[in-house]
Amino acid sequence: MTDTHLFLDDERGKDFVQYSARMAAAYHQTAHYMTGKPTGPMESLEAALRFAREKKVDAVALTGDILSFPSEAAADWLLERLEKLKADGIPYFFTSGNHDWHYEGWPGSDAAKREEWIPKRLGKLYPENADPLAYSVCVKGVRHLFIDDSIYEILPAQLDFLQKELAFGDPSVVWMHIPPYAPGRGVGFGCGHPAWGAGSDRNWEIERRERWREGGHTQTSFDFYRLLCESPNLLGTFCGHVHSTTLDIVNGKPFVATEANARGAWRLVEFRPMAK
Ligand SMILES: [Fe+2]
C-alpha cells in the first residue's frame, strides 16, 4: 500500500502549522477509482488492512507518503493499526516517501530533513534496529529490500547495500517510494532518469524545498539504476509516488507503481516459482 496521505494532526503539531498547512489540506477525499464512491485516507487505510487480513497475506509493504507530513498524531494512529496487524501475525515493512518526513519550508536540504524527521517522528514504524535508509527482510524465500529514495537520489551507502544484498543470490525485490526511470514514461524524475535535475524540477517552490541537483543524477544513482536493471536475481521494483497504477518493463523487469491509497487502492502481489 502506498501514498495514503494521512493528514490528521493534533495540538502537538500546532507549532508546525506553517510547515504543514498546504499538505494538511491535500488529498482529503477523492472518488474510489473503481466504484466512484468518495473515500478518505483513513477509511482507505483501514480498508487496505481489512483486505490484508481477509487474504491472510504474508506481509504488508508500505512504500511511502502514507503521511502527508511528519505529524505525531498520524504516526501514532498508523502505528497502532499496524501493530495490531502484526499481533495478528501479519508483519509490516515501512519505507518513507518525500512527504512523510517533509515540513514544507523547514530549512536545510532534503537529505538533512529526512535525517532529522524520520528518527523524530517515524522511527517506530520501522522494524527494530533497521536502518530506515536501507534494510532487508526475507519472507518465504524472497529477499525484500526496502530502500529510501524519497530524496529522488541514492546515497553511496545505499548502493553498497544493494550490491551486498543482491550478492546473496536470492530472488530479490526492491520496494521504494519513487519509481526508477523507465524510458518513455513521461515524467522528469526517477532514479537513473537522464533528464532529472534542477531543470526538470517543477515543484520546488510549491513544496518549499531546495531545488533538485544542478547537473542531474550523481554517478551513485546511475550505478544503482544499472544494478537494478542488470541483476538477474532482481525480480522487479514496487513503488508509489505517481498516484496511478503503472507497469513498465525495463530490461525484462517489471517496475510497478500503485494507485494512491486516498483513491481506495492497494495491490496484492504474489510471488511464485517460475516454471522451468
Ligand atoms: Fe511522493
Image (tube, helix red, strand yellow):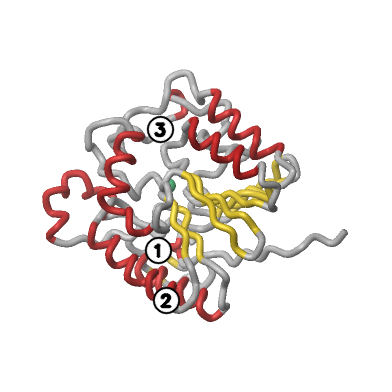
Question: In the rendered view, would you say 83 is above or below 66?
Answer: below
Q: Are marks 2 and 1 in contact (CB under 8 Å)?
A: no
Identify the residue shown where x is 60% and y is 63%. 139
Question: In the rendered view, would you say 120 is above or below 201?
Answer: below
Distance of mark 2 from mark 3, alpha carbons? 43 Å
Q: Quadrant of the C terminus?
A: bottom right
Q: Is residue 242 visible?
A: no
Q: Tell me the crowding category of disc 3: few under 14, some 14 to 19, or many 20 or more residues within 10 angstroms, Cα based.
A: few
Mark 2 or mark 3, earlier in chain = 2
Q: Kindly identify which numbered label has been placed on residue 253.
A: none
Q: Residue at label 2?
A: 87
Left or right of residue 235, residue 189 in this image: left
The secondary element bearing badge 1 is classed as strand
Identify the residue shown where x is 34% and y is 50%. 100
Quadrant in which residue 55 is drawn: bottom right
Distance from mark 1 CB to nearest ligand 1 atom below 8 Å: no
Mark 2 or mark 1, earlier in chain = 1
Q: Residue at label 1?
A: 30
Three-letter residue code for mark 2: Ala
Distance of mark 1 from mark 3, alpha carbons? 24 Å
Three-letter residue code for mark 1: Thr
Left or right of residue 189, residue 119 in this image: left
Instruction: Pick out the residue farthest to the top.
Output: 215
Question: In the rendered view, would you say 102 is above or below 57?
Answer: above
Q: Return the x and y of residue 266 as percentages of the image width and height.
A: 52, 65
- Which of discs 2 and 3 lies nearer the camera? The answer is 2
- Which of discs 2 and 1 lies nearer the camera? The answer is 2
The secondary element bearing badge 2 is classed as helix
